[in-house]
Image (cartoon, rainbow, N blue to C red):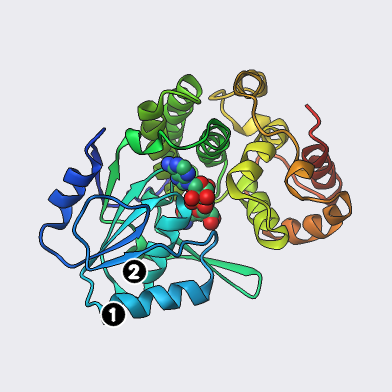
Amino acid sequence: MRFVHETLCQRVVFAPGSAAEAVHDEVGSSRVMLIGTRLDVPAVLRWDEVVMHVPVAVAERARAAAAARQVEVIVSVGGGSATGLAKAVALTTGLPVVAVPTTYAGSEATNVWGLTANGRKTTGTDPRVLPRTVVYDATLTATLPTELAVASGLNALAHCVDSLWAPRADPINAALAGEGIRALMAALPDDREQMFYGTYLAAVAFASAGSGLHHKICHVLGGMFGLPHAQTHAVVLPHVLALNAPGAGGRITLDELQDLRRRVDAPRALRDYGFEEDQIPAAVEAILPVVPDNNPVPVNAGNLKQLLHDAWEGTR
Ligand code: NAD
């Protein structure tokens, strides 16, 4: 074995039914900026303006407000969009973040930030944006509609599966991904505490292994065509697994994934989410240059076009 594995440093608190108390333990008497959903914690600033993919203008308003109120710690409560805004503020201010996720997007366990300007999303990594603490309280997902819970859960599963062949894939993140796959497949969609357990493993595996073919495809589809994040991941995953099956190391098969997708009535086709067939060539052109060199199967314009066509159409 020859590899280098990096483990990111953060506290993880599982506190079913008691997120507010757990957050209070983390922040003490600091001056809190609370981003997203209300939580019963004292705050000097409450910030409700949360927009998917974090527009730069929103981030700048939030940063200015944090400076004006002399904020000392940011608490984000919500999905990947709320966590993303907290990260954007942390990126320029260095303020610590306590993340309280309410979806299975997994941003809370990565050092990846994303910002959007003029319809283009830029991402990067920076240690300042990694939340200092994550608080998981499964009761906060009670309001998550089943349809979104399914799509978001499959987004978490995609973190695991893509980690198996991503650029920095190694035996440690594969072990995390394998246990994440097991937990998520058993828990989807209703065992929300186990969902968070699988979500965290998935996100840690993804943060370590980096973006594989699946994430490269979804990043282009989300950024260029404005497709919804979780649903796009949910639709594209079986098509990438079908192509990359030799790289899955037996940790998940296409049949197992398809059985799960039938059981939970998973999102099926990109055309249901606004993707048009005539956009496929532009997507192929944008994805090809960013396909990771170590992808287990050679990717070319032909098989990529077929993959996107199948995902657009919802071919089983
Ligand atoms: P989201 O945060 O936009 O949430 C989707 C919708 O669900 C929103 O309308 C939100 O208000 C609602 N919602 C969230 N939690 C809810 C709850 N418990 N009950 C009812 N409604 C709820 O979507 P997402 O899929 O969680 O996150 C997507 C964003 O996160 C994208 O911008 C994506 O790029 C980013 N992301 C970043 C990383 C990273 O590592 N940086 C990882 C994953 C996702």
Instruction: Tell me how far mark 1 sits from mark 2, CA to CA.
Output: 11 Å
Vertical placement of residue 102 versus 195, above or below: below
| Residue on which the image places disc 2 | 90
Q: Position of residue 282 (x, y in %)?
A: 82, 60
Q: Residue at x 50, y 23 (%)?
A: 185
- Can residue 103 be seen in the rendering of this structure? no
Q: Position of residue 113 (x, y in %)?
A: 46, 63
Residue type for callout 2? Ala
Q: Secondary structure at mark 1?
A: helix
Vertical placement of residue 278 versus 251, above or below: below
Q: Residue at x 40, y 43 (%)?
A: 102
Quarter in which the C terminus is drawn: top right
Residue 22, which numbered label?
Answer: none
Res 164 → quadrant: top right
**Label 1: how many Cα within 10 Å (few below 14, some 14–19, many 20+):** few
Q: Secondary structure at mark 2?
A: helix
| Residue on which the image places disc 1 | 67
The residue nearer to you, when weighing 181 against 188, is: 188
